[in-house]
Amino acid sequence: MQVSLTDSTGQIQTHDFTIRIGTKPLALVNLTTSQNSAMAMINALDILHVGYDTINSLPFDYNRYASIFLILGTAVSGSHVLTVSEAVTLATYLQLGGKLYMEGYYTWYYSNRTPLHPYFKYTSSKIPVWYYPDVTGTQGTFTNSMSYLYSDPLNFAVFSFEPTAPAYSTLINTDDPSKNLEIVYDGSDYKTIGTMLDFSSLIGDLPPSTQTTLMQRYLEFFGLNLTGPYPYFHAGTTSACLNQPVTFTDDSFDNITSRSWEFQGGTPEASNDMNPVVRYNTNGKYDVKLTVSDGIRTKTIFKQKYIQVGECSGTEEPPSASAFFKVFPNPVNEQVTVEIDRNISGNCKITLFDLTGCRLMEIQQIIPAGNRISLNLREFCKGLYFLKVQAGGWISTVKLIKN
């Protein structure tokens, strides 16, 4: 991160520092003596190029991870039984909006229920023995059209595993009627996947019935976007006065063909524009939702309580740096133009960064007549960049998409 400080004489000082932002996609927690399931997951994650940490004890800093995959074990020996203290920490994680996959067999019936188990929204009870040498996906869920041979020696059960609404089953056996093997809860408050199957024992050769595809669908269920399109947006301000116009900008990529905005408490309440202008006439904090499509896939981003609205009598919000600079076209194919407000003169510095913060290009010059500076980006690869403009004591950084 970089902070720029400007005093009344126009002197500028910049200070660089590093902070940790965001989360790692996944914590892979193996509490069993067997490494089979963990190694199969690692193989799938490596193929998908998804970052993860491997962990072998509870608790840890759950907030560092977007999702947790917890392996308790499905074997007769070597499985882990959750303690109450371990369960409480994971239940707290879910209360804060966590996403948890838990793999085990005995935990769903034989082991004592902990404060964590109700979050998986299921019931279990003793029934006659049933088998699952074959596993299939449930129609209408993210496992639709999947089918696997189940190679684990333990492929039978003597208890039911039933979802409690609104939870539902995603993997079942081939009985008629079928028995449930995996239950998911897709809530706005938290998400869980509870399975009695060993991931490494799900054998399938052809897509979509592969371990890698199943892992990808688990991660997408947890909200990790691996295939695009990638929905992003920002607002000109997130702190607005009553009836103040707020401009929203769709920063999504790649190849967006349609978009749909939802503005809680706003006017309008919905829009299909790329850069809609919205007003709010009641104090409060409001959600914003954007759904985009590339014509094949549809993805959504939701920002809770993103806009804060209050009365601002006798005050006027100062202009933002973005009001003095325009960057177009965006997305760009070859040449991008930076237009600087005509009231600004003197020196200008424009810097292009990649997503890692590496400086790729920098130009410094006197602002020309017409107040427009063009950059040739023909040699740069397709992707997302950051363009930083400094002039007249103002600094603005915008996302720039290269097609």
Image (cartoon, grey):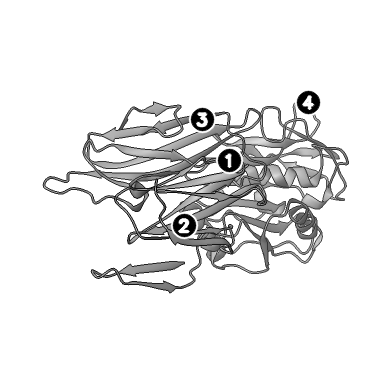
Q: Identify the residue position indicated by label 2 in the image.
A: 388
Q: Which residue is mark 1?
A: 253
Q: Secondary structure at mark 1?
A: loop
At label 1, which amino acid type do we have?
Phe
Amino acid type shown at disc 3: Arg
Asked if the residues shown at circle 1 and circle 3 are in contact, with their CB atoms under 8 angstroms apart, the answer is no
Q: Nearer the viewer, residue 380 or 26?
A: 380
Check whether the beta carbons of the residues at disc 1 and disc 4 lie within 8 A of each other. Answer: no
Residue 221: x %, y % from top left: 62, 42
Nearer to us in this view, 134 or 186: 186
- Ranked by sequence position, the earlier of labels 1 and 3 is 1
Q: Can see residue 188?
A: no
Element class at badge 2 = strand
**Residue drawn 54% across the image and 33% down it:** 292
Quadrant in the rendering for residue 286: top left
Circle nearer the N terminus (1, 4) = 4
Instruction: Give the mark, 4 or 3, whose residue is nearer the N terminus.
Output: 4
Residue with the mark numbered 4: 176
In the shown orientation, is residue 348 left or right of residue 208? left
